[in-house]
Amino acid sequence: MATRDTLSPKESECSSGADYAALALEALQEPADAAYAKELVDRVADDCQFTKDLAAVAIVYKQLGDQARAEELLQTAEDYCMSGEEQIYLAEGKMKVLGDQAGAEAALDKALKETNNLDPLIELGRQAMALMGDNSFAKKVYEKAESKIARAVEYTKLAGAAVEHLMDKDYAGAILEKAAAKLTNVGDLLSLAGETAKTLGDPAKAKALYQRAMDGATDFNAVKSLLDAAKAIGETEFMQAVLKKGGEIATATEQFIDLARGLKSTGDAAGAAGLMDQAENAVASLDEMQKVVDAAKADFTDDTERLARVQAKYEKRAANQAKYVEFGKQEDLADTPKKLFALADQVMAELEDPFYAAKLLGKVEAMLDEGAYQFLRYRPLILAVDKHVNDATWVARLLDDAAAKSGDFVWFKEVVKTAATALKNKELGREKARTYVQKREAALKANADANVYDYTKLAELVIADIGDAAWGVSLLNDAKTKASDHYALAHVASLMAKGGDATGAEALLMQAAQSCESADGCIQLAARLKGNNLDASMVRKVYEACGGNLSNPVEKLRWVEGIADELKDKAWASEAYAALESQFSSAGKARFDTSRMNRVGDEFYPYRKHAA
């Protein structure tokens, strides 16, 4: 230790009152040399002109027990105090010399007003905490710092300081929460999440921020950062979510391969397979195809179907590289479903490559999915996938979507007709068509408001497009329970006849005849039956039955007129007029005679005979 007789090497380095004061305080450490400490400060006390030096020397005199000298110097220090930085030294002097907490805080408050940048504010907070012994004023300093910052790196720095200097994790958490509410950039959220995990030791809050970052990620670099974060927090579920998010963003074959490997390492074999499918679809060169083959051999050896497929793709591409390059250029320019359909046809015609065709048709589906659903837009895709790709699962999914979205019967009919009659995979098509109709039938039977025509439309579809007459007749039997007027009964009967149930059709026609309560109803029924091309003998039989229900002579006369006007059978009409004549008295006889003369009275109009 330096003494009065030996110049200390440290003493030679002193150039200010504060330096001498620091050396004096060191001299007061055990074993203390108070005399030497006093000599050091006595040497410089009268020459000090700055608050820093005066306050430092005053603190030494306080330690030496010379309170009067200490207070004298501290007063001078306050008189000379000009800047915010000097206020900090003054505050230290007031606490250590006078024990004046209020005065020290007042000095610090003046310093705070003059301090504006983050780093000086953090340092002021640290000094305030060290000096005052509690964090109330230090928090006031940091709250001002909060108002001066906007970037994630600044928020994390302030939060870290709150823990380190203020020892207040709750306050640090509040700072990070405020930042999270303001910031949306993926990089900022990742930074906040990392600080939350490190500083607060709160993995749940960190994960919530990582989730927000993942939701907002739009490029692969962000995904890579998320993957690093996922590895750091060590949560398999989150890692899988990030890898799947990467699959939504990735565009390059190698990116998909890396994601697939990562996902498989988490135990999600199905998800990894899906990413490998995307890697295959993203292939744009022979070299990329080779990488897919290598990845399949190295990491997906248990997927024998994939191994065979990618090897076949590689060999076909290697043998036809020039064509693939040309088709690749056309693919880049194909910006509509129509162009992609044409290119898929060309690929199959020239390369017979269903895998490449599937890739092109996948792009078509993505384009179609961007707009409102219309079956007529998807129908060509269904047929193209069926024709070129022969992927039953894909076709089934497209058909299932179409059936689910075809609430209107017109479109439902088109979906069923397409499935039942237009597919190359006839077995799949028939199975799907029957399934859709069965579901529709069940819905009808569960709907008390379903009417006769709901059933007849379904029956027509079953008979005409599915070709199942028995099923159609069963639906018609359900329909007839809903029929009440002759229109509906005749319609159901006509469809029964088409379905091969002649007996059932005739019984229903007779029921229709019985439902007619007027001659006009009988005539309407006859017209409908003729329109349905029903056999003339059956039409007559039904019309006779209908007339048998009439008792009023005027109604019967109108019925007879229908024989001539609608059925065009004069011989039958003449017989009917003759049978009815006795029922008309003098009051109605003129009406009867005029009717008969106008329709079958050829003897009154000789030219009719000639014309006949």
Image (spheres, rainbow, N blue to C red):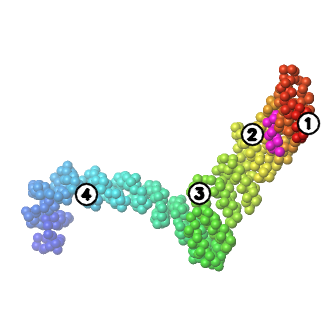
Q: Nearer the viewer, residue 81 or 22?
A: 81
Q: Which residue is mark 2?
A: 452
Please give left or right for residue 128 compared with residue 391 in the image: left
Q: Which residue is mark 3?
A: 369
Quarter of the figure that contains the C terminus: top right
CA distance separating discs 1 and 2: 37 Å
Q: Earlier in the sequence, mark 3 or mark 1?
A: 3
| Amino acid on which the number 2 mark rests in the picture | Val
CA distance separating discs 2 and 4: 83 Å
Which one is closest to the eye, mark 4 or mark 3? 3
Q: Residue at x 32, y 57 (%)?
A: 149
Please give left or right for residue 395 compared with residue 542 in the image: left
Mark 4–mark 1 CB contact (< 8 Å) = no
SS for dot 1? helix
SS for dot 2? helix
Q: Earlier in the sequence, mark 2 or mark 3?
A: 3
